[in-house]
Image (cartoon, helix red, strand yellow):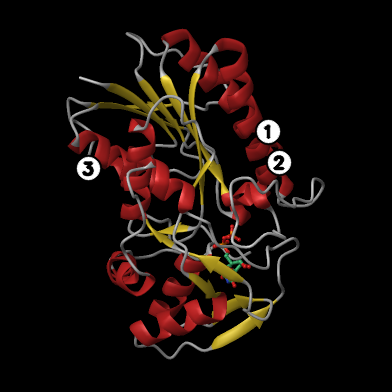
Amino acid sequence: MKKVLVTGGAGFIGANLCRRLLAEGSYVVCVDNLYTGRMINIEEFIGRTAFEFINHDIIEPLEIVGGIDEIYNLACPASPPHYQKSPIFTMKTCILGIINMLELATANHAKIMHFSTSEVYGDPYVHPQVETYRGNVNPIGSRACYDEGKRCAETLCFDYHRVHGTKIKVIRIFNTYGPGMDPADGRVVSNLIMQALKGEDITLYGDGKQTRSFCYVDDMIEGIIRMMASADEFMGPVNLGNSGEFTIQELAEIILEMIPTNSKITYQNLPKDDPVKRKPDLSLAYNRLNGWEPRISLREGLVPTIEYFKNIKNCDLNKK
Ligand code: UDP
């Protein structure tokens, strides 16, 4: 039985990944410090013989008794309000966290996948973003703790590979949504759906003309699994996401079409360094991951996502 470690396994993508890995017959060690991860995301796995939860912060070194075969390193606050709340902690999670996980991978001859981000492209001049584009990040801005932390983590992966021969995989994931999202994480999909469900004002930041590309979580998980199974010499970085591009205004209009509500669109200040546009070039993923491409359109994926949020009660929106 393959033994896999998922850091950030109680987060939105992490818990969806744990479910898939368990379904495939792996033994899953889920590590999370519950800073943004939530026990509710993993409670369905607790008690299963092939699942183990460790409450641990990857800023501290970690040893796994009996070793480990594969590591998925997701642990890091990922929504702008969360990662900006404690920027030094965010940076430590990115950098000390990946060093600790690379040490663990190297000592165990395990394969490690690092979850990088479209944020490494910053406010991009190249559109859509190809992996060879080196990005436009403000190194001293309020998003830098995450953007530069993730960039440095990519560097560390490749340096461990060059110095120690560590087996690495680096993916750059674009905005992802679906069941399991934290209703209070302050991101656009969760905010807008929750606002529409509660009949509150819809908060668009800036003029709403900035674009994002939204990937349904099941498509994302399939890409992740294929990347881990790909040949060792393919280390990435590779983009994973959905190339459908929407303005935030369009997203709001779709959500308002899908949820009967009295909510009205309002416009608020645009956060600093908010990227103007974002859309992945997915040709590398398609070519190297057996024709992987997202199958679920935004309108299709919003149906189960809205259902999920409808079932959540007594939650507050975390305003930016
Ligand atoms: N946004 C918005 N209203 C909200 C939350 C976010 O208009 O209530 C905007 C935000 O300014 C950004 C986009 O939606 O332009 C996506 O924001 P999110 O925090 O989801 O992710 P990002 O891609 O910025 O990391």
- Is the residue 243 above or below the residue 240 in the image? below
Displayed-image quarter of ligand 1: bottom right
* Left or right for 287, reference 129: left
Q: Which residue is mark 2?
A: 148
Callout 1, which amino acid? Cys
Quarter in which the N terminus is drawn: top left
> Which callout, 1 or 3, points at the residue further toward the start of the chain?
3
* Left or right for 195, reference 293: right
In the rendered structure, find residue 120 and report the number of the disc placed on it: none
Q: Which residue is mark 1?
A: 152
Q: Residue at x 59, y 71 (%)?
A: 211
Q: Mark 1 or mark 3, which is nearer to you? A: 1
> Could you say whether the residue bearing mark 2 is in a helix, strand or loop?
helix
Callout 3, which amino acid? Glu
Q: Position of residue 29 (x, y in %)?
A: 33, 26
* Mark 3 surroundings: few (<14), some (14-19) or many (≥20) residues within 10 A: few
> Could you say whether the residue bearing mark 3 is in a helix, strand or loop?
loop
Comparing 286 with 310, the one in front is 286
Callout 2, which amino acid? Glu
